[in-house]
Amino acid sequence: MSLFIQSLINGLNQGAIYALVALGYSMVYGIIRMINFAHGDFIMVGAYTLFYTIPLMVSMGMPAWLSVIIAILVCVIIGVAVEVIAYKPVRGAGSMSALITALAMSLFLENLALVLFGANPKAVPEIFSMPILNIAGIILPSKYIVTLIIGIVMMSGLAFFVKYTTLGQAMRAVPEDKQASTLVGINVNKIITVTFAIGSGLAAVASLMYCSTYPRCTTDMGSMLGLKAFIAAVLGGIGSIPGAMVGGIIVGLLEIFVKVYIAPGWYEAITYGILIVVLLVKPAGLLGKNVGEKV
């Protein structure tokens, strides 16, 4: 039972990371029907920002958690810059052009990081120095619980923002009908930029959660995380915010339980197999809707 509870907490923590990243995919796809494959690399940007800013904050006598705010700001700036410089010019050129541009941006960010930071992995310093809990024989690092709570708060906050705020309602209106949204005074370009900013900020929070669990960063870390988060988004229903949350949690739990109870070397194969099964059985995902598109 203790092993099961430990695995459950680890799986929820892992799933919350995937869910935050999957939210970025779903938000962008929901607004402009584009899969931003460079989104995973924003996690890498956030991780390297934490690596360099945590020692700086500590040396200045400031709390290490302030580096998280800097990481969010850096990711937001880069995310908005990528949207304005790379994606906006090809927005009306068709889905294939947008897809190729997204892949190119992903490769560009990874290789730029390789030039700037080198190929060797970097050990990210601890942000939260917390004890390991021993509850009835169940050993749990406190930071796992803290990062899980952060993920839940961020996802709940985003769901509230999208459902109840004026800006969130505009974000839901734009994918329904861009022309009608423009007629009622919604600035579509502004909504798209805000969507990229929010998604990039969530990626920075995901980098905090990832580095708290696995305290290292590499230039290619975002591509693998991004791919699994994309699978989570497809599983839950890409374009659906609740679907991204559900898909992320399912993928995280599945990975951990396969590692612990089946075979450690099989978890990635099973994760990628989920994508194939979902596309064959229910392409719209668990909470997605089948939408007919005119060709």
Image: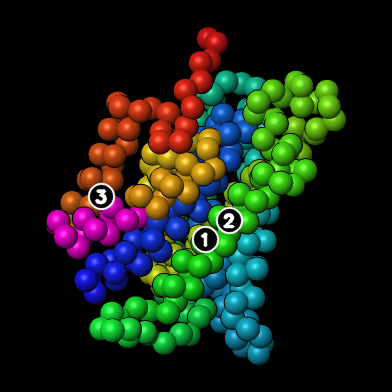
Q: Which of 161 and 270 lies nearest the eye of the viewer?
A: 161
Within 10 angstroms of label 3, few (less than 14), some, or many (20 or more) residues? Answer: some
- Where is mark 2, residue-wise? 156
Residue 226 sits inside the magenta stretch = no
Instruction: Identify the residue at image location x=55%, y=11%.
Output: 294
- Where is mark 1, residue-wise? 152
Whether pointer 1 and pointer 2 mark residues with C-beta atoms closer than 8 Å, the reply is yes
Q: Position of residue 247 (x, y in %)?
A: 41, 45
Residue 259 sits inside the magenta stretch = yes
Is 268 left, or right, of 62 in this rendering? Answer: left
Q: Looking at the image, is 119 positioned above or below residue 189? A: below
Q: Amino acid at mark 3?
A: Glu
Q: CA distance from mark 1 to mark 2?
A: 6 Å
Secondary structure under badge 1?
helix
- Where is mark 3, residue-wise? 268
Q: Determine which quarter of the picture holds residue 61.
A: bottom right
Q: Position of residue 265 (x, y in %)?
A: 17, 55
Within 10 angstroms of label 1, few (less than 14), some, or many (20 or more) residues? Answer: some
